[in-house]
Amino acid sequence: EAAVTQSPRSKVAVTGGKVTLSCHQTNNHDYMYWYRQDTGHGLRLIHYSYVADSTEKGDIPDGYKASRPSQENFSLILELASLSQTAVYFCASTGEGYAEQFFGPGTRLTVL
Amino acid sequence: SQWGEENLQALSIQEGEDVTMNCSYKTYTTVVHWYRQDSGRGPALIILIRSNEREKRSGRLRATLDTSSQSSSLSITAAQCEDTAVYFCATEASSGSWQLIFGSGTQLTVMP
């Protein structure tokens, strides 16, 4: 079964600070995604990647950067964290032969 | 927006009852995913229905897809307390795309 892990699981950051959220998958999937989930809402795509060393903008990329240094790892970077970025962030992966996306457990980010 | 409803819907039922959750979408898709999200965890696929299937069953779950009305439904027969979760539908961002667009979801609470 697909295994996607995220770290940290929760984080409190200060406004204007830099935050890096990490995602690691062990299933040889080519495609990886970062979503944010706000209370009472669905998932919105921030950035995604189809191959190492390449990232693409999703629906809400402003204020976020992404990095895919290897097939297994995908990071989400908030250079200047803002209050509006308080949310739960999910990483997901998928690959050839799979229709579904496999999600990590999420990172709860609180920006104060 | 891909979806007709933007906010999380809420349904509360008694154990043993049947329940149906609905989704409508605005753009063409060849597949509808239904994901379940338990509290504090990432979403997980529970059933997937393709455009050449009008109905798909998996245990107590039944999904339907009506491409002419661009709508899908998920039914749970004889709901149990452990079915309490948020249920999301998701469609392809475009035909053959590896991106998904998620609806805002339904919070289902099954009471004993």
Image (tube, rainbow, N blue to C red):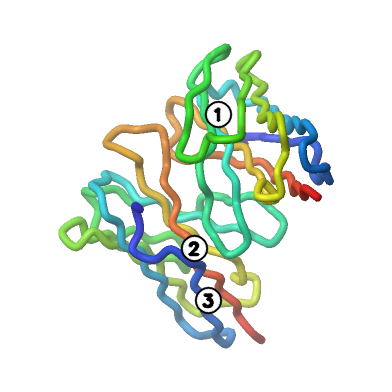
* Badge 3: residue crowd in 10 Å (few <14, some 14–19, many ≥20): few
Image quarter where the N terminus of chain A lies is top right
**Disc with the residue nearer the chain's start (3 vs 2):** 3
Q: Look at 51% across and 16% down and name the residue there.
A: A51
Q: Nearer the viewer, residue A73 or B34?
A: A73
Disc 1: host chain: A
> How far separated are the C-alphas under marks 2 and 1?
22 Å
**A27 relative position to B62: left or right:** right
Q: Nearer the viewer, residue A77 or A102?
A: A77
The answer to whether dots 2 and 1 both sit on one chain is no
Q: Which mark is residue B105?
A: 2
Question: What residue type is disc 2 on?
Answer: Gly
Residue shown at 77% from the left, 31% from the top: A18
Q: Which quadrant of the figure has residue A105?
A: top right
Amino acid carrying label 3: it is Ala
Between residues A74 and A109, which one lies in front from this camera angle? Answer: A109
Residue B22 sits in which quadrant?
Answer: bottom left
Query: Going 75% across and 30% down the picture, which residue do you hit?
Result: A20
Same chain, labels 3 and 2: yes
SS at mark 2 in the image: loop
Q: Which residue is mark 3?
A: B10
Residue B89 lies left or right of residue A55; in this view the side is: left
